[in-house]
């Protein structure tokens, strides 16, 4: 009987599950609050183009996968950060955050709500679901990976005068080797990125366009002289500006 009791006592002292670390409630709560704060700071870095905050939170070996299955490392993701455009009001909010902590690793899931208001137009709302993996290294949490997918938004094409399209025809440089070529074919406005097929831009308004089954919004912007000088691509709360070169 004593042997049985001793055996049961020994089993009770073994941690639950091989290799599993049981955190004290107070420590787990502190870590959860820290991770929630880091998620908000990281999201804010995209809104402000804040690369210093991004570098602090994102691990050097970070990998991110978007809804089109494009894989990016830290430097590629960092290039998406740009200073905010003064002509576009943007807000980004983390919602429905859920944190699970496993010792020095944590999984955070949630939803990003992006609200964008270009040039006094009505709000454009995007929503994405994400799963982030954080690792604690040398006492500090950093995000090591992210996978997100866009929640589908219902978009409706409106009728506008095709003569408006003449103002948008041209070439817009997104990066040194990436150019958007915008052409008019009959009553349609077409867009072709370097190395990609030609696709129709469907009007949501006189300045805002979308591509069927594609999550980005394309907005033509005018300079002080009233001429179109930029094409903005808005995707997952990120605003990428392509300068008109032709």
Image (spheres, rainbow, N blue to C red):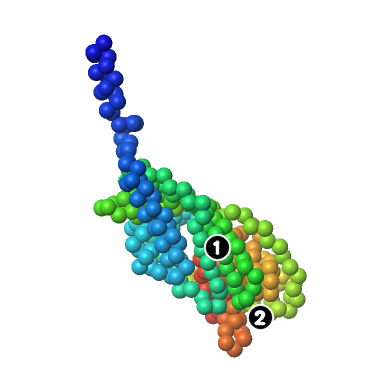
Vertical comparison of 15 with 46: above or below: above
What residue lies at 48% left-to-right and 51% top-to-bottom? 97
Residue 69: percent from the left, percent from the top?
51, 53
Where residue 114 is drawn, which disc sits there? 1
Q: Quadrant of the C terminus?
A: bottom right
The residue carrying pointer 2 sits among few (fewer than 14), some (14 to 19) or many (20 or more) residues within 10 Å by Cα, namely few
Position of residue 241 measured from the top left corner of the image (x, y, whole percent): 52, 73
Q: In the rendered view, does 162 fall on the left or right side of 238?
A: right
**Disc 1 versus disc 2: nearer the observer:** 1
Q: Residue at x 69, y 74 (%)?
A: 206
Residue shown at the point (64%, 73%) measured from the top left: 121
Q: How busy is the neighbourhood of tag 1: few (under 14 within 10 Å), some, or many (20 plus)?
A: many
Could you say which quadrant of the image residue 7 lies in? top left
The reply to whether residue 160 is in sight is yes
Q: Nearer the viewer, residue 196 or 98?
A: 98
Query: Which residue is under mark 2?
Result: 167
Q: CA distance from mark 1 to mark 2?
A: 29 Å
Name the image quarter holding residue 125. bottom right
Check the picture and name the quadrant holding the N terminus: top left
* Disc ID at residue 157: none
Visible in this render: residue 182? no
The answer to whether residue 245 is left or right of residue 2 is right
Residue at 35% from the left image edge and 63% from the top image edge: 55
Q: Secondary structure at mark 1?
A: strand
Instruction: Classify residue 107 as left or right of residue 56.
Output: right
- Closest to the observer, 19 or 28: 28
Q: Earlier in the sequence, mark 1 or mark 2?
A: 1
């Amino acid at each position: 009987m004593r042997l049985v009791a001793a055996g049961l006592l020994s089993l009770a002292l073994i941690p639950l599950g091989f290799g599993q670390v049981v955190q004290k409630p107070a420590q787990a709560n502190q870590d959860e609050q820290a991770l929630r704060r880091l998620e908000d700071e990281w999201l804010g870095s995209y809104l402000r183009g804040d690369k210093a905050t991004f570098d602090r939170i994102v691990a050097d070996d970070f990998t991110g996968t978007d809804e089109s299955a494009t894989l990016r490392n830290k430097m590629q993701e960092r290039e998406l950060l740009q200073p905010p455009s003064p002509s576009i009001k943007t807000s980004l909010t983390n919602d429905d955050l859920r944190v699970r902590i496993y010792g020095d690793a944590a999984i955070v899931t949630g939803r990003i709500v992006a609200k964008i208001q270009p040039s006094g137009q009505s709000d454009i709302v995007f929503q994405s679901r994400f799963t982030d993996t954080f690792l604690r290294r040398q006492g500090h949490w950093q995000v090591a990976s992210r996978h997100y997918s866009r929640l589908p938004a219902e978009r409706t094409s409106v009728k506008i005068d095709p003569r408006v399209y003449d103002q948008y025809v041209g070439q817009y440089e997104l990066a040194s080797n990436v150019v958007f070529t915008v052409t008019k074919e009959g009553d349609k406005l077409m867009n072709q990125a370097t190395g990609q097929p030609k696709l129709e831009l469907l009007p949501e308004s006189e300045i805002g366009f979308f591509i069927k089954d594609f999550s980005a919004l394309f907005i033509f912007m005018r300079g002080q002289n009233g001429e179109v000088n930029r094409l903005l691509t808005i995707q997952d709360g990120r605003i990428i500006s392509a300068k008109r070169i032709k």
